Image: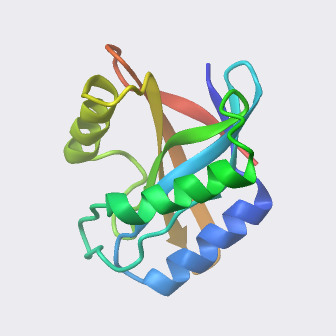
Amino acid sequence: MVTISLPNDQRARLRKCLRGAGRREIGGILMGEQVAPDHFRIVDFSVDDTTGTAAHFVRSPDHHAEALESFFRKTRSNFKRFNYLGEWHSHPSFPVRPSHEDIMSMQSLVNGERDIDFSALLIVRLRYFLLVEAAAYMFVRRSAPGEVALTS
């Protein structure tokens, strides 16, 4: 089973972003570090906090491409250790489970034209203005999606 760690500093940053967005969905891309086989740690994430509505989010590829390029510069393009990990978005009014549209979008990402073998999807929501509720799912080329162990 794949494990993704969401460190406390990244969880606190997510909490702040979710508070600012209120009832609008927001999201972006996840950048991670492989710390062991099948174990990744979220190191950074981009945020598109302008395009979401109460029930829908579509990320801006240009905005997130810049974030990814900056991440690669910071990590000196050490792609074996630091790389794109996946996507994230919030479900402020819904459970932290992928919608049918989320699943189709992620499957298209890993089975489409891009050379991506796998991609994680992290779905988050803020509960009681304090608690970040989160669940992660892994999408692998030519496989059914699977839930991921999410740790701090």
Q: Is residue 58 above or below residue 40?
A: below
Q: Is residue 142 above or below residue 52?
A: above
Q: Nearer the viewer, residue 8 or 107?
A: 107
Q: Is residue 25 above or below residue 94?
A: below
Quadrant for residue 41, please give it.
top right
Quadrant for residue 116, please give it.
top left
In the picture provided, is 60 more to the left or to the right than 81? left
Kindly tell me whether residue 28 is visible in this rendering: no
Residue drawn 28% across the image and 23% down it: 111
How many marks the image carries: the answer is: 0
Residue drawn 46% across the image and 26% down it: 118
Q: Is residue 43 above or below residue 150?
A: below
Residue drawn 49% across the image and 68% down it: 47
In the picture provided, is 7 more to the left or to the right than 142? right
Q: Nearer the viewer, residue 83 or 70?
A: 70
Which quadrant of the rendered structure holds the N terminus?
top right
Q: Residue 19 at x, y = what percent?
A: 53, 82
